[in-house]
Image (cartoon, rainbow, N blue to C red):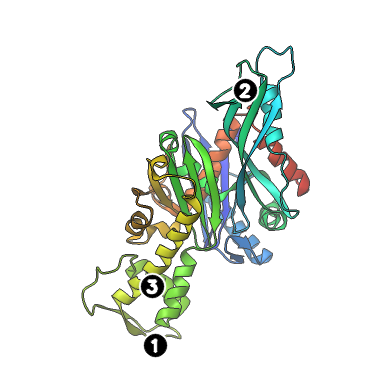
Amino acid sequence: MARSEILVGVEVGTSKVCAVVAESMRNEDLRILGAGLVPSKGVRKGEVVDLKLATECLHDALSKAEMNSNIEIDDVAVAITGSHIASFTNRGGITIPEGYMAIDEQALRDVAIKAREVSLPDDHTFLHSIIQHYYVDNQPGVLNPLGLIGRRLEADVHIIHGAKARVQNTLRCVDSQEVKIEEVVSGGLASSHAVLNDNQREMGALLIDIGGGVSDYIVFTEGVVNKSGVLAVGGDHVNNDISLGLRIPLTRAEKLKIEEGSALIGQSLPGEKITLKNDAGFSGKEIEREMLNTIIHARIEEMFTLIHKQVMAGISVHELRAGVFLTGGCSLLRGIREVAESVFDLPVHLAHDTGVSGPTPILNNPVYSTAIGVARFVQTRRAEEGDPSPIRTVWDQMKKLFGMK
């Protein structure tokens, strides 16, 4: 099989390190060949805090992915997350020189670069520059200005950026594995490539990827990215709340959340108890089920409320007709969909990978969504090689900045 058909998505997350090997199909679908998933160490809130531990975890994940797919991994694309990731929208414009009869691809490249001419914080670097809308001689809603006649071309660009050092720490983990980094993709954008289809983006959708340490979110309206960001709250915060509230070890708290917990309150029988058995260093105890669920509910409701506040400013619910989509490991929590519905007052769906085939245990497990989405992002980018969007320019600049080939 040709090397160009193989795509490898990597996520170095708070709770797990994941590598997915996929094959790009002729019908633009993606076929998963294998994956490697290991518990994460040395990563906190989506960012590397112990390079040695995180590197060892990534090595194990890549080794498992190679073994399970029977593919030797040479090139990878990497998801980046963390509370340092931020975004904004900027408009830039150019004047079409006299004598040019129509807007050409060079003009599209020039206006995209012009729209990116903004000042970032000194310690930040560009991750993505995504065209939202074009304007030709102040005419709004131009989907593709190529070939149109006009004197003034403008573009709105959604810019995603992050702290240079914190991005580089994740890339150093990957660079140490003797593989080439083909792309860097923000976590929310990656997940959207895995679970949202074109119709959902066009109708308007909010995707929330709830990981262990952070929750990435991204909003699409009229088919384009409207907002994106990262909230420094994830499933590990729920575990910590349970541990403190019920006075049990953190490891038992996570197990209790997964096996017995729910984000819904008022569903338990009066006085219903859960018995925790004796374990090494833990003498066991009985807890009230409603107390457990109340702790979970409070944190999950707070998380959605914070995202709602950040997302819905300037956006009406009518612009999100497809609703809210949840993915990531914490989306498996019982009752989480109902809590999200009560906060957003929108239909909420537990997202599934679209246009992807392969082993059912991988496709049905949302912990793989980000890594699958990274592979999908690269597949789309490869298909659009030669497109005048500035994505290649951004990544080329990043490689120079970080000293990568």
**Drawn side of residue 167 relative to residue 290, left or right:** right
| Circle 3: residue type | Ile
Q: Is label 3 or label 2 in front?
A: 2
Label annotation for residue 137:
2
Given the current orientation, which residue lies at the most extreme left position? 269
| Circle 2: residue type | Asp
Disc 1: which residue: 283
Q: Is residue 164 above or below residue 392?
A: below
Label annotation for residue 295:
3
From the viewer's side, name the closer residue of 224 and 310.
310
Residue 235 percent across, percent down from the top left: 46, 64
From the viewer's side, name the closer residue of 125 and 358.
125
First of labels 1, 2 by sequence position: 2
Q: CA distance from mark 3 to mark 2?
A: 55 Å
Mark 2 residue element: loop
First of labels 3, 2 by sequence position: 2
Residue 134 percent across, percent down from the top left: 59, 28
